[in-house]
Amino acid sequence: SCHWTSTHRLIWRDVKNHECCIAMPLSQILLFEEQAAGIGKSAKIVIHLQATPANKEPGPYQHSKYSFIKLSFKEHGQIEFYRRLTEEMTRKRWENTPASQPIPIGTGSQAGRTRAVGIVGIERKIEEKRKETDKNISEAFEDLSKLMVKAKEMVELSRSIANKIKDKQFGLRSYLLSMGIADPVTRETHGSGTHYHMQLAKQLDDMLQAPLEERGGMMALTEVYCLVNRARGMELLSPEDLVNACKMFESLKLPLRLRVFDSGVMVVQLQSHSEEEMIASALDNVSDKGSLTAEEFAKLLGLSVLLSKERLLLAEKMGHLCRDDSVEGLRFYPNLF
Amino acid sequence: MHRRGVGAGAIAKKKLAEARYKERGNVLAEDQIVQMSKQLETFKSNLEEFASKHKQEIRKNSQFRVQFQEMCATIGVDPLASGKGFWSEMLGVGDFYYELGVQIIEVCLALKHRNGGLITLDELHQRVLKGRGKYAQDVSQDDLMRAIKKLKVMGSGFGMIPVGGSYLVQSVPAELNMDHTVVLQLAEKKGFVTVSEIKDSLKWEKERACHVLDHLLKEGLAWLDSQAAEEAQYWLPALFSELTSRDVTPEEANQMTP
């Protein structure tokens, strides 16, 4: 929108030709009102004017049969404008302070120059900045395309080589991983350990001992992901990095295990917390209370609902618990059959 | 007299066996390794150059990120596969998406007891933006979707269900098949659905409708309003905006960080 109001004037400027301006003293305004937008019609503010004063400067028109002008707001702004105009019309600052220099109506007039720099100068800077940003973006896109062409060649070469080698050495796997190329044979970027993952696995063992103890020996992989990445702050692990590292626990003889439940939920588990213990604890707690839901069990043990549910399901699977599944919720009872 | 064992003959034989083995492609040949290393070095320096000029662009501009991701997909590369990958190390794309993953998990966890583990992409977007604070980079829905795709591999049931022109994000391993999805889509407009509506729109038998609705109730994804005027209404908190405008409470926030 190219309307704005100063403390003394209502000003309009041509979008295309920034040095073409029309100004009108606010003192000429009798009253103004909003006209809502309609279908095919933009929102408007109608300004009713007083009779022309004798000392009026020449303007775009000599005569008009109308005693009002309409400001059209094609792309919003009318609310803010209305508010501003109301404010200025209320304060009537033009009555107290003289107007500053006139806005240039023509081009190249020296007298108007100083005033023009203020407003036009700022607008020009914004315009330049935008052009520069556009230029940056288009340069970035161009460079990106060139980069991708080179990357593509590499990827094709790597794939054709990797396709022939079924038993991938560590080095080859690391290379594929760094490029982000899925193993063409297994189609996975995870499930393939590298030195990096071995190191990670050991780091995880250190990091997770205490938190696991606090949580009854088990944590969902998503919990681990958040814990580890929050601690790292940068150079974060990808979800696949985490899964790959956890898959190496057993082969590295670390006391942790990655475990997948029937539901698909993946957890990291302390090896010392055996299956039997977990099931026994579930059975004990359920027998003690008569019956338990996953939420209730979670509260008892201080575990997440997700993992409590998995434990109860496990105990059920082993035949120690049975369920009552109603719309009230899923409740587990000791299996007395 | 012939020597047995070690000797020129035995060595030649060994070399032949090695050559045959390599030929069968079971091991990378020397020159292949050299070739790949050279290419890798060249590529790394290209990537470094690109990064030095445009790393900021990727972090600031979501449109650019979309372009970047699509181009990578075209050439068959997953820049987010590993934090150790060149793409994530040099361009910092990894950290951007992996951190977003953490924020998504936390929001979903905090709201799970309210909505059963189902949330609209819009609401997730709003809440993530809020959590990031006003000085953080802008994050688009495309960014969220890519981060969610990556989270799937950790097995906690992350997925997206197309509904009403956008998506519902699932963050629990509840089994949702086509029947469930279709009912969710039906419920999208009003935030609730009735058995009659399902029968009328989808032409199902009452039993099938009830079976699906029961499952949604059991999974905590739907709440039953049996006091409703004509017929029982099944409300989906994920779609019911009045409930979801509440801020996360301190108790819920405790669920978030381990």
Image (cartoon, coloured by chain):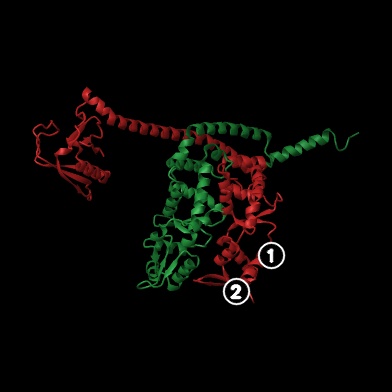
List the residue tagged with mark 2. Answer: A290
- Left or right: where does residue B74 sit relative to residue A67? right
Task: State the residue at coordinates (45%, 53%).
Answer: B124
* Mark 2 secondary-structure assignment: loop
Residue A276 - label = 1
Q: Colour of chain A?
A: red
A204 versus B23 height, above or below: below
Image quarter where the N terminus of chain A lies is: top left
Q: Position of residue A287 (x, y in %)?
A: 63, 72
- Left or right: where does residue B64 sit relative to residue A54? right
- Left or right: where does residue B189 sit relative to residue A149? left
Q: Position of residue A337 (x, y in %)?
A: 64, 77
- Left or right: where does residue A68 sit relative to residue B202? left
- Nearer-N-terminus badge (2/1): 1
Q: Position of residue A145 (x, y in %)?
A: 47, 35
> Is residue A109 visible to us here?
no
> Is residue A100 visible to us here?
yes
Q: Position of residue A285 (x, y in %)?
A: 62, 69
Question: Which quadrant would residue A257 be assigned to in this image?
Answer: bottom right
Q: Give me the C-alpha separation between circle 2 and circle 1.
A: 21 Å
Label 1 sits on what residue type? Glu
Badge 1 density bin: few <14, some 14–19, many ≥20, Cα 10 Å: few
Which chain wears green? B
A271 versus B93 height, above or below: below
Label 2 sits on what residue type? Gly
